[in-house]
Image (cartoon, grey):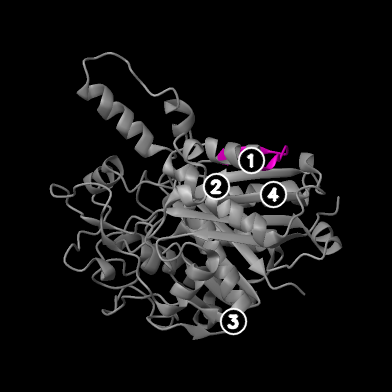
Amino acid sequence: MELKRVVVTGLGALTPIGNTKDEYWNALISGKSGAAPITYFDTEKFKTKFACELKNFNATDFIDRKEARKMDRFTQYAMVASDEAIADSNLDLDKVNKLKVGVIWGAGIGGLETFQNEVINYCDGDGSPRFNPFFIPKMIADIAPGNISIKNGFMGPNYTTVSACASSANAMIDALNYIRLGHCDVIVTGGSEAAVTIAGMGGFNAMHALSTNNDNPQEASKPFDATRDGFVLGEGAGAIVLEEYEHAKARGAKIYAELVGGGLSSDAYHMTAPHPEGIGVMAVMRNCLENAGLKPEDVDHINTHGTSTPLGDVAELKAISEVFGDHAKNININSTKSMTGHLLGAAGAVEAIASIMAMEHGIVPPTINHKVVDENIDPKLNLTLNTPQKRDIKVAMSNTFGFGGHNACVVFKKLD
């Protein structure tokens, strides 16, 4: 059967550097860091005392107070970002066939704060199981797309993909395939995460995964820099409206780009460390290119996973050099995590939005905070260091990888 084409018609972003897609984009090209001391809890005894929290965000500015109390922060973030994306798409919800509109969402952890607080309250009590009746529905990772569909009446496929930090990229690939095969006309996809919590920070610190540069948080996320010492935890959401091309064309929708392919692979190597030679990463990028019907030399821009960890950055860039060969030096490579921090399950969606907007505006956002060259990284690669670069982008790729060896890759193309 002939596969249907899939295009992007709506974007929504709620990030540590901007609470709308346009604020996010303007901060990206300005090289703005979202890292700052944590305000959510007392960090006196924590190794890491900073993160990329949302700024000037109040859920009840967007969600009825009574409803907001029934939602963990990761669901609140999902609701706000998806509302923006749906509004941006100009979908007429009274005219679409809601049986063919779905929500496929990504979350690596889900309602961690809700789980944490309920357990703390129980342990501080007299042993009586006095749990909030909304404990379970606030916590479960699939509740975010459930709430999005309930609000909008979308009756198509509705579920959450969980593959750690690859979760929202997995969600986009699932959404791509449902539309390609004709099962849906429209899918709201993306991801959200709210792990800047006592349990989140404590757990990642125990793994030695986070930067401990407490003296200079804004420069702590420094992908590809020789002095990088771990990632900076971020939070927020990214939402993308994917639509079958003819459906979008018939209603005169603005089309940002075409989602032409997605790839998946596994490192099959270690719970938390990437394969040092990037074998799984090579496989996922090759799978993605094959799925999209593209050649390596077609790619103009890659938004890397680039978390600012000593092992991960080197392995990914080794894989890029191997897959793209001599063409690798012609690609604008960057890591927007240098600004947003690592949004875990929301990273794939938030970074895909950055790639789409880079294509739209002809500017590649910088990888900020780079000062010291890492001799383990190929010097011929253009890592878009510290300054945005103008570039006519016809094809943009976005990589996301997760604990457990999960690799996901999506590629977008400027519409012909």
Q: Earlier in the sequence, mark 3 or mark 1?
A: 1
Left or right of residue 178: residue 388: left
The alpha-carbon separation of the residues under discs 1 and 4 comes to 15 Å
Q: Residues within 10 Å of mark 3 (few under 14, many from 20)?
A: some
The alpha-carbon separation of the residues under discs 3 and 1 comes to 35 Å
Mark 2 in CB contact with mark 3 (< 8 angstroms): no
Q: Residue tagged by mark 1?
A: 151
Q: How many marks?
A: 4
In magenta segment, residue 388: no
Q: For this rendering, which residue is in front, 359 or 301?
A: 359
Left or right of residue 212: residue 104: right
Which label was assigned to residue 79? 2
Q: Residues within 10 Å of mark 2 (few under 14, many from 20)?
A: many
Q: Residue tagged by mark 3?
A: 362
Q: For this rendering, which residue is in front, 176 or 154?
A: 154
Mark 3 in CB contact with mark 1 (< 8 angstroms): no
Three-letter code for the amino acid on which mark 3 is drawn: Gly
